Image (tube, rainbow, N blue to C red):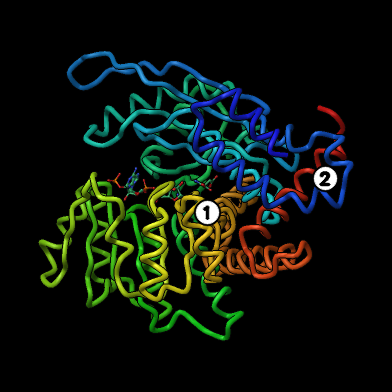
Amino acid sequence: MTDILAVIKARDPEQREFHQAVQEVIESVRPVLDRNPEYRRMAVLERITEPERVILFRVPWMDDQGQVRVNRGFRIEMNSAIGPYKGGLRFHPSVNLSILKFLAFEQVFKNALTTLAMGGGKGGSDFDPKGKSDNEVMRFCQSFMCELARHIGPDTDVPAGDIGVGAREIGYLFGMYKKLRNEFTGVLTGKSLGWGGSLIRPEATGYGSVYFASEMLGVKNDTLAGKTCLVSGSGNVAQFTVGKLIQMGAKPVTLSDSSGYIYDEAGINSEKLDFIKKLKNLRRGRIKEYADKYPGTVYTPVNPSSDCNPLWNHKADCAFPSATQNEINEKDAQNLVGNGVKVVCEGANMPSTPDAVNIFLERKILYAPGKASNAGGVAVSGLEMAQNSMRLSWPKEEVDNRLKFIMKSIHKTCLDAAAEYGTPGNYMAGANIAGFLKVVNAMLDQGLV
Ligand code: NDP
Ligand code: 2IT
């Protein structure tokens, strides 16, 4: 099996994030392959690690000065064994094939865990929305969709948001798709409420992550009430993680962006969270302004030469990394457990490096991998697709109850699979095994396609 990884590495040596995501799964599913030799004969690992289709295209657009710019657009259609490709679009200068393949690969397992019929995909661009005017963002989205439209559809591939893609971008993308196809369909999720969006979709990833943490604590007869929580990021996932933590009586004390982080020992309350939402979503400002507004808060800028992130070095009970991949390294993980953190619940995708994960597993803390704990976002996207198909919309309580039910079910699925394959309590192994089995068995049912 190490051979499969060696072949993948030799084929695309520069795709480090993709190798990282694949290696974790290969190690987790070893006992599954040992129990069922047929999987090896049918080369399921070789098949599941190769995208069904990779689309790469030029995105030309004009900036406000009349200068033409060119970015790269991507869509990775990873696996459609259990449903149409489904997964977000990321607009960030770091976007490349490695990052999108790792995200698409993780999405396949995550979507399988949600109980809904969704395959896995991911896409995006190296376009940086930061500092761009609304008109520039609109022109970029329109150009991006001019090409993407021919590859997607409500029963084929249904994109959504991710880093740098929120309600504004989804609106511009949807408008262009509708104009090109002359069809009003649920081709994207994360739409605004007035034209096909689902209640609770904006909240879903953050809320779901907190529901998952609460389930994990429940196994230990504990709750989130009174727990001090470290949260990173300050975008969609981080904001609604903080919101739900406040509702559950916990005390979130940190938030960050790519420039630095704030530590508010008194706790971020609802009023302060409203300030963050306006700052980040309307003014598109920097988190530093929080410290200017609320005295007693410490702002620490990012230090690129530091070997660790001081955000993870505060006394706390729980950590919710909700910014980006590999934001917790080995040293950060040591700091977290050294400071008494007992729960690490990933809102972001692959925020912990493999060395960091090993520390969480060795120390037997409650560690939830993103593909389980952040699945609430795509799960409610699946519910948005269901509502669009019925041309109905469910009330808030109904969607929230379904989200809670799905997060509970993912939690149980992870624990059951981990116990069945000899790693009780290991949510990472459980998530990988359960997702793998669902997708691989569907692939085998459908023959060699
Ligand atoms: P947003 O764009 O809303 O927010 C991203 C936040 O993370 C910002 O605060 C951003 O800071 C920070 N960030 C992004 N890249 C970096 C970086 N390279 N270094 C440091 N900070 C960074 O994105 P989301 O909240 O939607 O996504 C956050 C994470 O959650 C991602 O890993 C995403 O894949 C994952 N996720 C999102 C889901 C969703 O439904 N939106 C669902 C499941 C997972 P800055 O503004 O300075 O860039
Ligand atoms: O990583 C993710 O699960 C997302 N960005 C959400 C994907 C979706 O289709 O809602």
Residue at figure coordinates x 70%, y 33% from the top left: 3
Q: Where is residue 198 in the image (x, y as percent from the top left)?
A: 52, 54
Residue at figure coordinates x 48%, y 17% from the top left: 57
Q: Left of 207 or right of it: where is 110?
A: right
Compared with 270, 44 (above or below) is above
Question: Are the residues tagged 2 and 1 within 8 Å (C-beta)?
Answer: no
- For label 2, the residue is 441
Placement of the C terminus among the 4 image quadrants: top right
What's the amino acid at mark 1? Gly
- For label 1, the residue is 377
Foreground label between 2 and 1: 2
Nearest the camera: 311 or 117? 311
Compared with 2, 388 (above or below) is below
Q: Left of 432 or right of it: where is 396?
A: left
Q: Does label 2 or label 1 sit earlier along the sequence?
A: 1
Q: Left of 368 or right of it: where is 341?
A: left
Nearest the camera: 94 or 82? 94
Some atom of ligand 1 lies within 8 Å of the CB belonging to the residue at label 1: yes
Q: Can residue 424 be seen in this view?
A: yes
Placement of the N terminus among the 4 image quadrants: top right
Q: Can residue 199 be seen in this view?
A: no
Mark 1 element type: helix
What's the amino acid at mark 2? Asn
Q: Position of residue 254 (x, y in %)?
A: 28, 65
Mark 2 nearby-residue class (10 Å; few <14, some 14–19, many ≥20)? some
Q: Distance between the residues labelled 2 and 1?
A: 25 Å
Among the 4 quarters of the image, the one containing residue 418: bottom right
Considering every residue shown, the one lying at the far bottom of the view is 221
Q: Position of residue 222 (x, y in %)?
A: 52, 84
